[in-house]
Image (spheres, coloured by chain):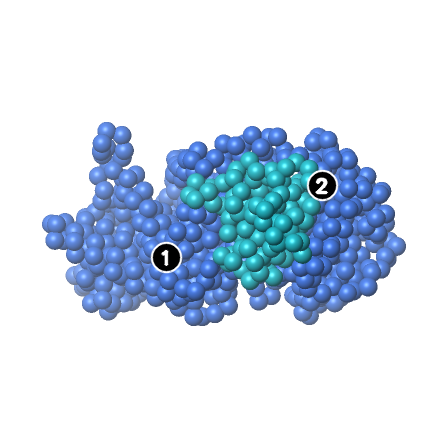
Chain colours: A blue, B cyan
């Protein structure tokens, strides 16, 4: 097998070639049908995530080899109930299935994946897929669960009535995809032609007729319709209870954030110590002074200050993926719908906003599940206000330097309380902004309906968790290695050149470009209590928030020597007033300091306008918040 | 389209049903759901895509804390969450089996 190299060809140029040599098979199915688990089972690690040209919908392709030795390119498409696409995700599914997109994903065969214990809606989709004029194969997934519930399906009868091959699969079991693979060989070997291509957007009458036909087939091929899963019923009696459900949801969120901070700490210390050790090693290496400073202060200190957050990001995504795979996320949206609706947000916005606590980028991309454009825009607009993990380093640094570590009310740590307050400010800010946006931009909207399937609970599979966390961790490290590294190098150059003249009396950094820039914008930031060092840190912080910590580290390291570099917090405590520190915290709650987020907003909304709206409203909020905090703090005597 | 006067006496809109209601769908009438966030024809198509068609058994399983909204409805073999104002379009008769 030589399937380890899976290069996705550029969409237009070499596409026609590849589709001739390697057959393309697309997975289509309802949300929660186990499609992704099947994709993982079939392709294993031989998968690749890219974007469809022009949009940010994830294009998941993988390669597999059938028992007969046939190589197949498998495409995993976003879940949908029909080809009548309403969200950007569903549009991709429709366009790929209809062959409207670049031909490297135009399927030679469509596998309609269905949850065997929830076949009804999937059968209607299968009937619709039959109309696109490509060979279709129906795979009844999670057959084991269906059998356990006493659901018996006559595959042969179903295949005869539908007029397409029907196989069963158990994605999570070894050998569970054998029947599917054998059928793939058979269908592709015979070069089966699809029926006539006469798909058109169905009207209500046609949909109704199709669902009736699906119900007729079900009655023929299935022993019983399948009652509600008893385990799910028992769990939902508590988890969807009007009061207990919300209490449990809040408790889950509390545990999640607790874990992010508490569990990650030992690992973070380890990574941090590792980088310090490595920096010290390089610092004592026999290298020219300039190169040594570049490696130690610029590269290692800078990149290290960011990679330290990898454990927190992994833990946060672990929780989000577990809740998602468990089937709990849809319940969370159900519980939060009314509450969020009060602030002008859609219940479905809950998942994107929760993801935004890890990072606004996956959060904004997750808004694609919201059908209505206006609801989606509101969510995108406020997603960057959720306290993302990149703010954590800045908050941690300033809090540990300025907020005394003492207990209040006998049980709560003051530092933790301030941290909690910062999160709360972000959430309240988001609710307020969406409330205003709803009334300012689109008053007339009655509100997109909230319609969502609540899937049966399922035990998350370790394999899909590992794959999910791995791809996200990799994306983060890639960012640390590219954007953030480049910014750290830039900061170091700005802070190191030009070098101090002969016989200079001030520290070297006062003569650098960094100082010049910092002084230049001082008039604007003076009312916020920001000194020129902060100004310098804010500029590269535009690329990524967490860079500000590394930047402050580099500036004060070059300024104050080796001791300061080890303890940025000490340096800050000596140089900033409490008012300045608090103003900086207030600034970071709102500041639009993340170029990648802005870029994603531009891509997702397809307009510069919404990117600009986000940037300026956040900048204005940040300025006002920092101004208020600083002036009030000074008035109270913390200047 | 079933006779409206007969429907009104024997039927209930799912949007008005209490938790624990069991019945069978007899019609989709988007005119009843005037407060819905979608034009009638689109609402009808979405409801059908989620399995709300005439003849399907329904059971109202759960409701939210504020105003009993949204609701979770068992439709045949799947569970769908939706708001009451859209569920107004789903007309059902109570009872396990309907003639």
Residue A301 in picture, x, y percent from top left: 37, 50
Front-most of residues A389 and A279: A389
Residue A364 seen in the current view: yes
Closest to the observer: A49 or A609? A609
**Relative side of A368 to A385, left or right:** right
Residue A191: mark: none
Q: Residues within 10 Å of mark 2 (few under 14, many from 20)?
A: few
Kindly state the secondary structure of the residue where label 1 is placed. Answer: helix
Residue A297, image x, y percentages: 35, 53
Residue at the right extreme of this rendering? A190
Q: Chain of mark 1?
A: A
- What residue is shown at x 61% (from left), y 44% (from top)? B10
Per the image, the residue denoted by label 2 is B99
Secondary structure category for the residue under label 2: loop
Answer few, some or many: residues within 10 Å of disc 1's Cα (few below 14, many 20 plus, some between 14 and 19).
Answer: some
Q: Chain of mark 2?
A: B
Residue nearest the viewer, comparing A304 with A256: A256
Residue with the mark numbered 1: A435
């Amino acid at each position: 097998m030589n399937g380890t190299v899976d290069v996705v060809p550029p969409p237009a140029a070499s596409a026609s070639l590849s589709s001739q040599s390697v057959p393309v098979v697309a997975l289509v199915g309802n949300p929660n049908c186990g499609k992704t688990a099947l994709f993982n089972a079939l392709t294993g690690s031989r998968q690749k995530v890219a974007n469809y040209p022009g949009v940010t919908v994830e294009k998941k392709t993988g390669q597999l080899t059938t028992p007969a030795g046939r190589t197949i390119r498998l495409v995993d498409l976003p879940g949908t109930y029909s080809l009548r696409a309403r969200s950007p995700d569903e549009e991709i599914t429709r366009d790929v299935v209809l062959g409207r997109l670049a031909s490297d994903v135009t399927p030679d065969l469509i596998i309609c994946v269905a949850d065997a214990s929830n076949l009804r809606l999937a059968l209607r989709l299968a009937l619709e897929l039959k109309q696109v004029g490509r060979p279709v194969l129906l795979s009844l997934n999670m057959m084991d669960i269906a059998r356990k519930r006493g659901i018996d399906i006559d595959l042969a009868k179903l295949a005869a009535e539908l007029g397409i091959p029907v196989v069963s699969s158990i994605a999570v079991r070894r050998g569970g995809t054998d029947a599917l693979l054998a059928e793939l060989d058979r269908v592709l070997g015979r070069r089966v032609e699809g029926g006539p291509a006469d798909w058109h957007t169905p009207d209500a009458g046609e949909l109704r007729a199709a669902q009736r036909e699906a119900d007729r087939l079900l009655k023929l091929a299935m022993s019983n319709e399948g009652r509600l899963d008893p385990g799910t019923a028992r769990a939902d009696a508590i988890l969807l209870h009007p009061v207990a459900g919300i209490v449990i949801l809040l408790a889950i969120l509390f545990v999640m954030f607790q874990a992010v901070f508490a569990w990650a700490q030992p690992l973070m210390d380890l990574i941090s110590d590792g980088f310090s050790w490595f920096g010290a090693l390089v610092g004592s290496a026999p290298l020219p002074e300039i190169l040594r400073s570049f490696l130690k202060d610029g590269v290692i200190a800078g990149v290290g200050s960011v990679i330290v957050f990898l454990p927190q990001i992994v833990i946060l995504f672990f929780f989000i993926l577990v809740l998602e795979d468990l089937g709990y996320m849809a319940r969370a949206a159900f519980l939060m719908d009314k509450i969020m609706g009060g602030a002008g947000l859609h219940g479905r916005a809950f998942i994107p906003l929760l993801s935004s606590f890890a990072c606004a980028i996956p959060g904004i991309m997750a808004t694609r599940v919201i059908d209505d454009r206006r609801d989606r825009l509101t969510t995108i607009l406020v997603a960057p206000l959720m306290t993302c993990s990149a703010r954590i380093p800045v908050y941690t640094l300033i809090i540990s330097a300025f907020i005394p570590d003492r207990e209040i009310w006998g049980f709560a740590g003051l530092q933790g309380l301030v941290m909690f307050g910062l999160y709360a400010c972000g959430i309240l800010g988001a609710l307020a902004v969406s409330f205003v946006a709803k009334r300012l931009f689109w008053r007339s909207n009655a509100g997109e309906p909230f319609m969502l399937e609540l899937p049966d609970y399922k035990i998350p599979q370790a394999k899909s968790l590992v794959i999910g966390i791995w791809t996200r961790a990799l994306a983060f490290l890639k960012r640390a290695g590219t954007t953030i590294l480049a910014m750290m190098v830039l900061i170091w150059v700005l802070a190191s050149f030009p070098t101090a003249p002969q016989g200079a009396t001030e520290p070297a950094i006062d003569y650098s470009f960094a100082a010049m820039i910092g002084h230049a914008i001082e008039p604007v930031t003076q009312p916020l209590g920001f000194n020129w060092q902060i100004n310098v840190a804010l500029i590269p912080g535009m690329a990524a928030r967490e860079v500000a910590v590394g930047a402050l580290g580099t500036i004060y390291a070059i300024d104050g020597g080796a001791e300061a570099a080890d303890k940025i917090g000490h340096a800050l405590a000596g140089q900033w007033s409490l008012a300045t520190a608090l103003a900086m915290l207030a600034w970071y709650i709102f500041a639009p300091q993340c170029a990648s987020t802005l870029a994603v907003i531009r891509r997702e909304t397809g307009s510069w306008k919404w990117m600009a709206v986000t940037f300026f409203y956040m900048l204005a909020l940040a300025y006002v918040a920092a101004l208020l905090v600083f002036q009030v703090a000074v008035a109270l005597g913390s200047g | 389209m079933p006779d409206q006067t007969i429907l009104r006496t024997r039927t209930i809109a799912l949007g008005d049903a209490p938790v624990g209601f069991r019945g069978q769908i007899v019609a989709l009438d988007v005119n009843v759901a005037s407060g819905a966030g979608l034009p009638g024809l689109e609402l009808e198509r979405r409801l059908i895509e989620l399995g709300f068609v005439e003849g399907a058994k329904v059971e109202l399983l759960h409701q939210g804390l504020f105003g009993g909204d949204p609701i979770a409805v068992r439709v045949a073999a799947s569970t769908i969450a939706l708001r009451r104002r859209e569920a107004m379009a789903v007309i059902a008769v109570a009872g396990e089996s309907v003639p």
